[in-house]
Image (cartoon, coloured by chain):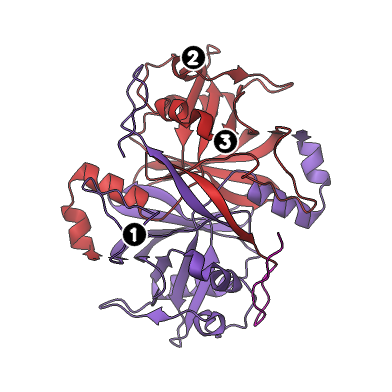
Chain colours: A red, B purple
Amino acid sequence: MNISTADIKAMEQRYRGTFINSLPGFKCLNLVATIGASGAHNLGLFSSTFHIGANPPLLGLVFRPESSHHDTLTNIKQSGFYTLNNVLPSFYEKAHLTSARYESGVSEFEACGLTPEILSDFQVPFVAESTIKIGLELRETINLSINNTTIVIGEIIQIQLSDEVKLSPDGYVDHISAQTVTVAGLDSYFSAEALGRLAYAKPNIPAKRID
Amino acid sequence: MNISTADIKAMEQRYRGTFINSLPGFKCLNLVATIGASGAHNLGLFSSTFHIGANPPLLGLVFRPESSHHDTLTNIKQSGFYTLNNVLPSFYEKAHLTSARYESGVSEFEACGLTPEILSDFQVPFVAESTIKIGLELRETINLSINNTTIVIGEIIQIQLSDEVKLSPDGYVDHISAQTVTVAGLDSYFSAEALGRLAYAKPNIPAKRID
């Protein structure tokens, strides 16, 4: 099937949203927790985390203008801190529910049955049910005039790995042991099954498995 | 295990790169094809594709300053066009090999055993072995002064889906039928297994499967 610009433009709006969101592949899924000026907890599900650099350790996150996650962006700008927490098969339905349009000030932790966990020296809660918990400090926001989205760049300043998460001697975090869930589109969730970890690629030498 | 900023700073450079790259979860994996000023084909593997919007249909892509993919960025800026192609289990090792540092001008298609496919009205090749092929036109590049990375924003202008790719009546692209591979870190590849597709989330209503 060949789809052109004209075909994309002619699509019904929700159809196009579902189609374009699901087209590129599996995405990085994280529950983003923040805290409001009043101290209220906020939790939202995001699939736009992307790696920007390891030194300093930076992650990007995209906020759509029509997003139901306005509180999240407001809170990040106001407090300067937020946490990313992975999603497991045991609670992906609860994580999905955080996408519902709760009133401002309602804690999605409470409404969706997830547990806020306060770790030492970090005012923003983590998700107790997650096995990989990442605390970030806001470094930069970029407004994209092309479609009014905002890219938030944060530096990783605290990490909590549960005991079951395997960390390889070379620093590799094993998401099979962490039971991390991935997502395609806005609403389709997946577990992962390992194909193989491959050695550093060198010209004209066949790929070699290292696990 | 609790890891602090001081711990991250103290990590050996390659350890930190592997650790931070693999920490947030599974990523969107695409072979990016471009064409040089001389007409030479270029192919590189990227795990930084992220969704920016559906109308217009925009995707972001991150280029690291020390990347082996300098040709890719040069070519995109020069020609204004590029393609994203999904990776299947049948050729993920070949896709991985495109990451090797081939000399400028060498076609990674040829060096790695993948087939360039020219579709009508699009000068940049697609990957014939892929089942989801996306043609993009450059819209914007953003230089991040925080760590000298570049974000490339492109608009989707052509899409080719193979016959085996299931497209739902609501526009959802099924990556199980497409056999799309995902990646964690720089070198660990995975197939996906469906947990479930969930209905649009509404406050205080339990998540419901729609597949």
Q: Answer yes or no: is residue B123 visible.
A: yes
The image shows residue A26 at horizontal and vertical percentages of 46, 50
Q: Which mark is residue B70?
A: none
Q: What are the residue bounds of the magenta stretch?
A: A200-211
The residue where tag 3 is placed is A86
Q: Amino acid at mark 1?
A: Glu
* Same chain assignment for discs 2 and 1: no
* Same chain assignment for discs 1 and 3: no
Q: Amino acid at mark 3?
A: Asn
Asked whether, in this view, residue B123 is left or right of residue A121, the answer is left
The residue where tag 2 is placed is A110
Earlier-in-chain disc, 2 versus 3: 3
What is the quadrant of residue B68 in the picture?
bottom right
Q: Nearer the viewer, residue B210 or A153?
A: B210
The image shows residue A75 at horizontal and vertical percentages of 51, 24
Q: Amino acid at mark 2?
A: Glu
Quadrant including the C terminus of chain A: bottom right
What is the quadrant of residue B119 in the picture?
bottom left
Asked whether, in this view, residue A25 is left or right of residue A5, the answer is right
Residue at image coords 42%, 30%: A96
Q: Is residue B178 magenta?
A: no
Q: Is residue A203 magenta?
A: yes
| Mark 1 residue element | strand
The image shows residue B153 at horizontal and vertical percentages of 42, 57
Against A97, is A58 above or below?
below
The residue most toward the top is A38
Residue at image coords 83%, 45%: B10
The residue where tag 1 is placed is B155
Q: Answer yes or no: is residue B187 visible.
A: no
Residue at image coords 59%, 39%: A179
| Mark 2 residue element | helix
Classify 10 Å Cα crowding around label 2: few (below 14), some (14-19), many (20 and above): some
